[in-house]
Amino acid sequence: MIAESTLMKVCLVVAIAGAIGLFAFSYSLQPYRLSISTLTDNDLGKRITVNGTVRDPVVRNGTAFFELQDNGRKVNAVLFKAAPLQTVFLQAGMLVQVTGRLTMYRGSAEIAVEEIRPIK
């Protein structure tokens, strides 16, 4: 039979290892902070955060489509099932911060937006 003190030591080691593992895993979920001008094919599939100016926003069937521009470079963005409040504030010329997954759609890079917020 295992002694109680040995069992407590094993539990403590497992708990510490689990906490370290959770911390490392949560760090890997953080989006990469990039600029639009530095996006490459190597970033496809990654969760990213970029800042940019909204260009040509259009809302159809609750989905917002727009371009983000920064330093002369641009990337398409789509916000699926956009909340009405999000589409109201989404106007051309606004500076926003967008977090989402960089994907390829019809041969062009596109950000599938998860979060968007205006930058003041």
Image (cartoon, helix red, strand yellow):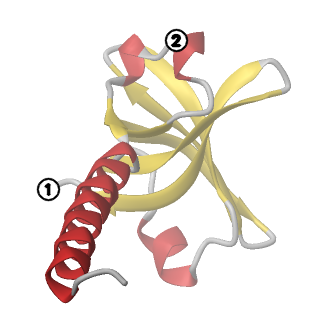
Q: Which label belongs to residue 74?
A: none
Q: Is residue 81 above or below residue 49?
A: below
Q: Is residue 112 left or right of residue 69?
A: right
Query: Marks 1 and 2: in contact by CB < 8 Å?
Result: no
| Amino acid type of the residue tagged 2 in the rendering | Thr
- Report whether residue 3 is seen: yes
Residue 40 - label: 2
Mark 2 secondary-structure assignment: loop
* Spot occupied by residue 79 in the image (x, y as percentages of width and height): 62, 58
Tell which circle, 2 or 1, labels the residue nearer the N-terminal end: 2
- The residue most toward the bottom is 4
> Where, by quadrant of the figure, is residue 115 drawn?
bottom left
Q: Residue at x 32, y 80 (%)?
A: 2
Determine the CA span between mark 2 and mark 1. Answer: 27 Å
Q: Residue at x 61, y 25 (%)?
A: 44
Image quadrant where residue 33 sits:
top left
Q: Position of residue 4 (x, y in %)?
A: 20, 88
Residue 1: x %, y % from top left: 37, 84
Q: Which residue is mark 1?
A: 120
Q: Quadrant of the image for the C terminus?
A: bottom left
Q: How many marks are shown on the rendered structure?
A: 2
Q: Is residue 94 in view?
A: no
